[in-house]
Amino acid sequence: MSEELNRIPISKVKRASKFVTTGVKVGANYVKAYGKAALKGTLDKDELDKENASDIYNSLSELKGSALKMAQLLSMDQNVLPKAYSDKFALAQYNAPPLSYPLVKKTFRENFGKNPDEIFDSFSKSASNAASMGQVHRAEKDGQTLAVKVQYPGVANSIKSDLKLAKPFALKLMKVKGSEVDPYMKEVEEKLLEEANYELELEQSLDFVSKCKHLPNLVFPNYFREHSSPQILTMSWLDGEPIGEWMKKEQSEENRNKLGQTLWDFYMFQMHKLKMMHADPHPGNFIVKDTRLGVIDFGCIKSIPEDFYSSYFELARHEVLNDSKRVDELFKKLEIIRSEDTDKDIKTVTTMFTNLIRLLSRPFNEYKFDFGNDEFFSEIYQMGELISKDPEMSRLQTRGSRHFIYFNRTFFGLYNILNALKAKVNTSTANDYLKLAS
């Protein structure tokens, strides 16, 4: 596949054809793998996963938009997919193939009636960063260095149809039934439609920055309304290094802990004070400069309903998990236990989710937590494997309020970054918030 995309399939027919072609490639990979297995006597599942992951990712990269965003979302929870898929799909976070400059100019003319060089003093023809929904170009205007995010053509108009086309792939990879994920797919659709609206992102960014700018060690871009539109968002350029690249280099324990604490306090303030959160915590959205944390993307903001918030965080307190009657009440409120469940189902679900919540909420119940402790994450992955391999638990795992999908995604993303940082974090702020919430 070319490093730079000259065209993106925009019509529903062309995008559907791309999914069909990908399905044919995946089918051919299975035929080839089972043919080899017949000769060798064993199926090389890892090789099959790698070939399928590569073919699917290449197709999603060409389609971009919601199709590629879905890969990004799946890659953030490495326990959902085989490793070959999560590794390949993680490229969607901040390393997707860029769009060609002629299409960038076309988007500018459609939004402003002008080419980029007629608006800015200078504009880089090559993208500095290409992700799932858009790419960023460096520009200069009146002595200021700017980051100009340009949305890919057809993104907003193709979200609903793309999700319908991508759904069979997701169901096969996640091994669940279609009816079980419909509420969650609807939630994803709503958030993707919001992310595709750069005018909404502009307002969300201005609002979020104004409410969080007092927090220590954080830095945010300035936003320029006059150079923004439904498909183009202009902000000041934040110098620094993407946190994913920063973490690969040797860093002092002090600096890692400082960034980890900044990230933790930032998210606790959002969730508990603002009742909304930056729900896309992947490395491509954070910049590091002089041990300060820059936040550069507010396209995915999740509002937290009060009834969901109170029930969710009440369960985060371990003493509540010891109260079986209260757990039963809260599980029903959060739709973890359903009216049609049998007594056997209720027992299995209650045990499974209580153990899972007790594990995931451990940082909330300690004064200081070492996210660099790989044993904690091994326990999470082992529990996920246990659930996926147990037919009874696997059958019952897809349930709960639709708000869980972005809420849990946020925590998995946050925990994964803190683990990569090897950060020791003072989590007492969470304990304080939980006491106030109760």
Image (spheres, grey):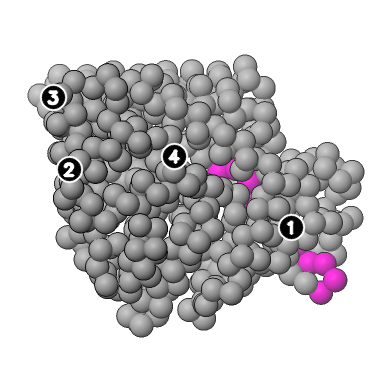
Residue nearest the observer in this picture, 107 or 385:
385
Q: CA distance from mark 2 to mark 3?
A: 16 Å
Distance between the alpha carbons at the discs numbered 4 and 1: 30 Å
Residue 347: image location, x then y, percent: 14, 31
Q: Amino acid at mark 4?
A: His
Badge 1 marks a residue whose secondary structure is strand
Q: Upstream in the sequence, badge 4 or badge 1?
A: 1
| Left or right of 71 on screen, residue 395 | left
Residues at marks 2 and 1, CA–CA distance in whole angstroms: 51 Å
Circle 3 crowding by C-alpha within 10 Å: few under 14, some 14–19, many from 20: few
Highlighted magenta segment, given as a residue range: 132-143
Residue bearing mark 2: 324
Q: Secondary structure at mark 4?
A: loop
Disc 3 and disc 4: Cα gap in Å?
26 Å
Q: Which residue is mark 3?
A: 344
Q: Do tag 4 and tag 2 residues touch (Cβ < 8 Å)?
A: no
**Residue drawn at point x = 85 percent, y = 71 percent:** 142
Write down the residue under mark 4: 403
Could you classify mark 4 by the number of other residues whose Cα lies within 10 Å: few (under 14), some (14-19), or many (20 or more)?
some
Q: Secondary structure at mark 2?
A: helix
Residue at image coords 50%, 61%: 273
